[in-house]
Amino acid sequence: MNWRWKAYYDKQPWSLAESLHIIRETHDGSLEVLQAPEVKSYPPGSLLPTDHAFLHSDYGGRADVKGFMQAVMDAAWEDGMRPTGFADVKNEIAAVRYHLEDMRKLALPKE
């Protein structure tokens, strides 16, 4: 189920301001805007309350947690952020393809 989450990362380098806007379009076309989350502090060793989830959905619920995470990840990727440990191998793959093409030219008989 995709309720069409959209995440917009707004970076203003001239003022060093950044903001993240998270919006969901519902099935009837209305827009729901995620407001700033509330941050609570707990002392070391405290047990966290069980209702602390930012988004939660029971089976068939409306929260669409994966859709929300996908929208945020897409916005971060668009800004150039990559997951920690991400290894971009597209240049290596292109080099292997060129190498294989060269090997084909050498190994295959010319017609």
Image (spheres, rainbow, N blue to C red):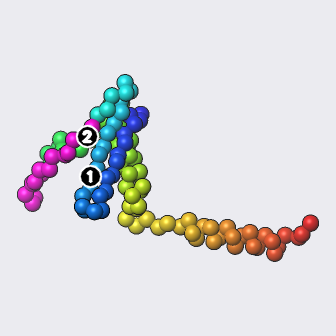
Image side of residue 88 versus residue 36, left or right: right
The span shown in magenta is: 33-47
Is the residue 33 above or below the residue 101 in the image? above
Q: Looking at the picture, how far across and down is residue 54, in whole percent?
A: 23, 44
Image side of residue 96 versus residue 73, left or right: right
Q: Which residue lies most toward the left here?
A: 43
Q: Which residue lies most toward the front here?
A: 14
Residue at the spot 39% in from the left edge and 58% down from the top edge: 79
Q: Which residue is mark 2?
A: 34
The amino acid at mark 2 is Leu
Count of labels in the image: 2
Q: Secondary structure at mark 1?
A: strand
Residue 79 appears in view: yes
User: Which secondary structure type mostly characterizes the magenta part of the structure?
Assistant: loop
Is the residue 29 above or below the residue 56 in the image? above
Residue at the spot 36% in from the left edge and 33% down from the top edge: 25
| Residue 48, numbered label | none
Residue at the spot 39% in from the left edge and 47% down from the top edge: 70
Q: Secondary structure at mark 2?
A: loop
Q: Which residue lies most toward the bottom here?
A: 106
Is the residue 29 above or below the residue 35 in the image? above
Q: Which residue is mark 1?
A: 19
Given this view, does label 1 or label 2 mark the residue nearer the observer? 1
Q: Looking at the picture, how far across and down is residue 59, in whole percent?
A: 34, 32
Image side of residue 6 versus residue 101, left or right: left
Q: Quadrant of the C terminus?
A: bottom right
Looking at marks 1 and 2 on the same chain, the residue that comes earlier in the sequence is marked by: 1
Residue at the spot 37% in from the left edge and 27% down from the top edge: 29
Marks 1 and 2, how far apart at CA:
13 Å
The amino acid at mark 1 is Ser
Q: Looking at the picture, how far across and down is residue 104, in whole percent?
A: 78, 70
Q: Is residue 75 magenta?
A: no
